[in-house]
Image (cartoon, rainbow, N blue to C red):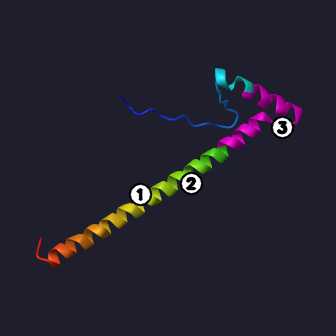
Amino acid sequence: MGKRITKVYRSGDQIHIAVTRNFEDTATDFFRFCKGNHYNPSEVIRSCMEDWLKRQQRIKEMLEGDLEMSSKMGMEREKRFLQRMKEEGLS
């Protein structure tokens, strides 16, 4: 099966979300709050999506950095171990 291509969004495109049973009250409260306080719900949702994405990307960078560091440390440990074996005539 081929790779699924992710849609490229353009200005004016709509993004739809489904209101699930456990999200009904939250969605109702959110839109009621936005209307009562003159917030643009779409702008609030876009800014939340942007914040979430930035956090997730940062977490991913940190995890990948930790893995890279662990890998480098592991290789250094292995080099030292092999060097000791060689020095002791075990290799």
Q: Residues within 10 Å of mark 1 (few under 14, many from 20)?
A: few
Q: Residues within 10 Å of mark 3 (few under 14, many from 20)?
A: few
Residue 71, position as x, y percentages in the image: 36, 61
Nearest to the eye among marks 3 and 1: give it. Answer: 1
- Above or below, 88 against 55 in this view is below
Which residue in the protein does label 3 denote? 39
Quarter holding the N terminus is top left
Distance between the Cα atoms at labels 2 and 1? Answer: 14 Å
User: Which residue does the image show at 60% across and 46% down from the upper left?
Assistant: 53
- Chief secondary structure of the magenta portion: helix
Amino acid type of disc 2? Arg
User: Which residue does the image show at 77% across and 25% down from the upper left?
Assistant: 28
- Classify mark 2: helix, strand or loop: helix
Amino acid type of disc 3? Tyr
- Above or below, 91 against 37 in this view is below
N-term-proximal mark, 2 vs 3: 3
Quarter holding the C terminus is bottom left
Distance between the Cα atoms at labels 3 and 1? Answer: 42 Å
Which residue in the protein does label 2 denote? 58
